Image: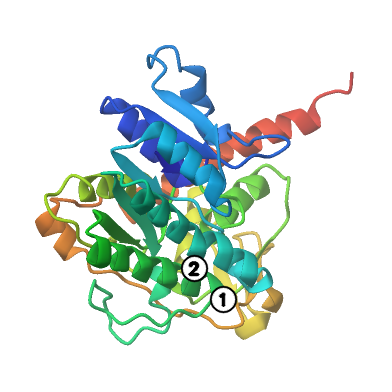
Amino acid sequence: MVTGVTGQDGSYLAELLLSKGYEVWGVVRRRSSTALARIDHLVENDDALDSSLHLVNGDLRDTGSLLKILRQVRPDEVYNLAAQSDVKVSFDLPEYTADVTGLGPLRILEAIRELDLPSRYFQASSSEMYGLVRDSLQSEGTPLHPRSPYGSAKAFAYYTTRNYREAYGLFAVNGIMFNHESPRRGESFVTRKISLAAARIHYGLQETLQLGNLDARRDWGFAGDYMEGAWRMLQTDHPSDYVLATGESRSVREFCELVFQEIDQPLTWRGIGPEEVGVGPDGRMLVEVNPQLYRPTEVDILQGDASRAGGDLDWQPTVSFQELVRMMVTSDLEVAERQAARENSPSK
């Protein structure tokens, strides 16, 4: 059972599980029009997969729907990937974020306990829980100091997962995942915002890209690698929490520079602070800072130590930072090219 199956992580995890012969039940939040773009290729190929992918309506805010699904499916493994995961949005919608991202995992765990299921449970925890970091590298033992409602909600879910493991003997683990990206990343997240904007600029669909803190540093990896790590955590003999990270930290500025290099528009930075801009070889302003995009409390740097996952799970990231950027830019150039073709086609 996979919550958040229509998201970036859920789509990669569903692919992985289906390739291993699993029967996958994906929980989809009911909408007037369900967004299935990331798993369309799996739904379309359902017959070829011997009907191994099933979509069911459910909501982390609705205990009744979770009980109904768990009672029906009785899953061997439960992967909770669903959340309100936009840090900036969490400042605007703190109560909603706490309800979905914090209390949602509690509802699943309590339902598993109440139904006395043997399910193994994976909680998608976040490096944002570390927040105001004191260690140069963050590991499983690093103290948590979240700096956003999102980080606080994830910390609640993290401790809840540990408590259900210790109090009730559930096989429940936290995967403390540092930033992980892909061409399927939501367009509001900074990496995808950058790669898509660069592609649109390349095709004349957009003039500039607006960003907030250029100097925030993150440990960026490939989402598919992290879902492999999540699966491995539930195959161990004893439940435990693990950090998944690349061990490298890059700034938003560096990510931006590499993306624009990919479209042959290397950036030169001029000005300082809110007045800083990135200009292309021809002098055009391509990137500008918008102070309204700053967070009320910033997380300056995140860099993970995944050595324990490497030793216990034999897990290592396989996609380099440069490969990840190239993958995202290549995909978004195709997206922008199709959009440009539609906009330039003669009207019927």
Pick the front one: 49 or 269: 49
Question: Residue at the spot x=11%, y=56% of the render?
Answer: 312
| In contact (CB < 8 Å): disc 1 and disc 2 | yes
Q: Position of residue 160 (x, y in %)?
A: 37, 67
- Amino acid on which disc 1 is placed: Asn
Density class for disc 1 (Cα within 10 Å; few <14, some 14-19, many ≥20) is some
Q: Could you tell whether 221 is left or right of 68 in the image?
A: left
Residue 154 is drawn in which quadrant? bottom left
**Is residue 190 shown above or below 275?**
above
Give the structural element (helix, strand or loop) at label 1.
Answer: loop
Which residue is disc 1 drawn over? 213
Residue 29, disc = none
Question: Residue at the spot x=49%, y=77% of the render?
Answer: 215
**Is residue 137 shown above or below 97?**
below
- Amino acid on which disc 2 is placed: Val
Q: Could you tell whether 175 is left or right of 285 in the image?
A: left
Q: Position of residue 103 (x, y in %)?
A: 50, 63
Pick the front one: 226 or 247: 226
Quadrant in the picture for the C terminus: top right
Residue at mark 1 to residue at mark 2: CA–CA distance = 8 Å
Which residue is disc 2 drawn over? 252
Give the structural element (helix, strand or loop) at label 2.
Answer: helix
Q: Earlier in the sequence, mark 1 or mark 2?
A: 1
**Is residue 347 shown above or below 72?**
above
Residue 318 in view in this figure = no
Question: Residue at the spot x=20%, y=61% of the render?
Answer: 240
Question: Residue at the spot x=26%, y=76% of the render?
Answer: 137
